[in-house]
Image: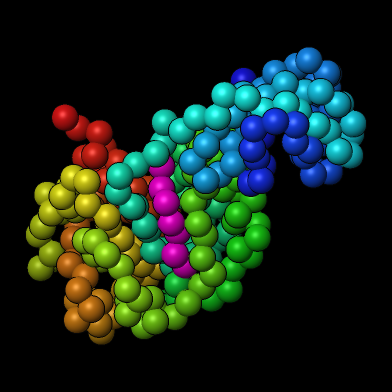
C-alpha cells in the first residue's frame, strides 16, 4: 500500500501540500475513492481514502488512527561523521531508517573530510525511507557540530564510541543492555584520533568494537544500528 507523510495528520478530512498532492494525483494517478496510508512521523498511522483528486491540494478522509509497529521503549541515537561522498551518508540514513533509529547526530572531527552537510537533503532521504518501510516515526537528523561539543551533550543512556584499536576487546553486542537508551559514535574514514577517544571516555563514552571486519564509516553505522535493534528483538 502507498504511504504518504503528513506531519499535521489527524482524523477527518485533511489536505496535502502541493508536492504530495502532485505525487498522489499526477505520478500515481490515484482517483477519488482510492485508499492508502498516512504517517505523521510522530508515531501514528492512519487509513486514508482520497476524496478530492486535486493535483495541488488533494484531500483525504483519515480514519483508524493507530500506533506504528516501530514504537519503542528505548532511544537509539547514532552519531556519525559524514562521509566524503554524500551518497554513502545517504545510504546509511536510508538503511538506518528502514532498520529503525530515533536520532542521527552529525559531527566533524580531526580526520573528517566533510565538514558541511545538506541536512534538508538528508531529511528528504529519511522521509522517503520512512514511507517506503511504513514507519510511523521519522528520525531526527541534526546538523553538524564539532566533535568536542557533541561528546559533552547530555544523553540519558549508555554511550559508546566505536574504535579500531588492538586494546579494544569488548564488543557492542556484549556491553549494550537490552531496553536501554543508547548512543554510538561512528568516526570518519580516518577513524578517531587518540585524543578524541580520550575526550569521549572523559565524557562517559565506552570504547567498543563492532567485530573483526574493517568496516567503512557508513557500514559501521548500519552495523551498530542493527546490533542494537537485534538485541532488543531477542526474547
| Residue 200 can be seen, yes or no | yes
Vertical comparison of 38 with 17: above or below: above
Query: Where residue 156 sits in the image (x, y, percent)?
Result: 27, 65
Q: Nearer the viewer, residue 95 or 74?
A: 74
Query: Where residue 132 sits in the image (x, y, percent)?
Result: 58, 33
Query: Where residue 77 sits in the image (x, y, percent)?
Result: 36, 57
Spot the residue most to the front: 12
Is residue 181 rendered to the left or right of residue 46?
A: left
Q: Nearer the viewer, residue 85 or 18?
A: 18
Q: Residue at x 58, y 73 (%)?
A: 116
Q: Which residues are magenta?
A: 100-106
Which quadrant holds residue 6? top right
Which quadrant of the rendered structure holds the C terminus? Answer: top left
Vertical comparison of 201 with 166: above or below: below
Q: Number of callouts in the render?
A: 0
Tell me the colour scheme of the image: rainbow
Q: Residue at x 72, y 21 (%)?
A: 49
> Is residue 104 magenta-colored?
yes
Q: Residue at x 62, y 20 (%)?
A: 1
Query: Where residue 24 sits in the image (x, y, percent)?
Result: 79, 30
Q: Nearer the viewer, residue 50 or 228?
A: 50
Spot the residue most to the top: 33
| Residue 223 can be seen, yes or no | no
Is residue 27 rendered to the left or right of residue 97?
A: right
Which quadrant holds residue 120? bottom right
> Is residue 221 magenta-colored?
no
Q: Residue at x 83, y 33 (%)?
A: 58
Amino acid at each position: 500500500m502507498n504511504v504518504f507523510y503528513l506531519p499535521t495528520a489527524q482524523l477527518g478530512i485533511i489536505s496535502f501540500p502541493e508536492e504530495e498532492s502532485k505525487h498522489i494525483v499526477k505520478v500515481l494517478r490515484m482517483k477519488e475513492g482510492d485508499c492508502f496510508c498516512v504517517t505523521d512521523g510522530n508515531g501514528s498511522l492512519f487509513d486514508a481514502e482520497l476524496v478530492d483528486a486535486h493535483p495541488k491540494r488533494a484531500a483525504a478522509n483519515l480514519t483508524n488512527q493507530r500506533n506504528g509497529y516501530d514504537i519503542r521503549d528505548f532511544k537509539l541515537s547514532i552519531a556519525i561523521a559524514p562521509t566524503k561522498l554524500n551518497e554513502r551518508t545517504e545510504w546509511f540514513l536510508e538503511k538506518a531508517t528502514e532498520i529503525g533509529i530515533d536520532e542521527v547526530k552529525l559531527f566533524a572531527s580531526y580526520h573528517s573530510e566533510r565538514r558541511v552537510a545538506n541536512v534538508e537533503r538528508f531529511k528528504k532521504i529519511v522521509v522517503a525511507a520512512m514511507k517506503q518501510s511504513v514507519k510511523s516515526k521519522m528520525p531526527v537528523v541534526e546538523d553538524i557540530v564539532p566533535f568536542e561539543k557533541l561528546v559533552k551533550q547530555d544523553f540519558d543512556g549508555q554511550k559508546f564510541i566505536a574504535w579500531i584499536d588492538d586494546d579494544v576487546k569488548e564488543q557492542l553486542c556484549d556491553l549494550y543492555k537490552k531496553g536501554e537508551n543508547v548512543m554510538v559514535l561512528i568516526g570518519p574514514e580516518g577513524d578517531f584520533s587518540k585524543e578524541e577517544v580520550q575526550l569521549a571516555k572523559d565524557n562517559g563514552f565506552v570504547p567498543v568494537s563492532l567485530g573483526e571486519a574493517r568496516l567503512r564509516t557508513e557500514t559501521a553505522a548500519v552495523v551498530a544500528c542493527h546490533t542494537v535493534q537485534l538485541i532488543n528483538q531477542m526474547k
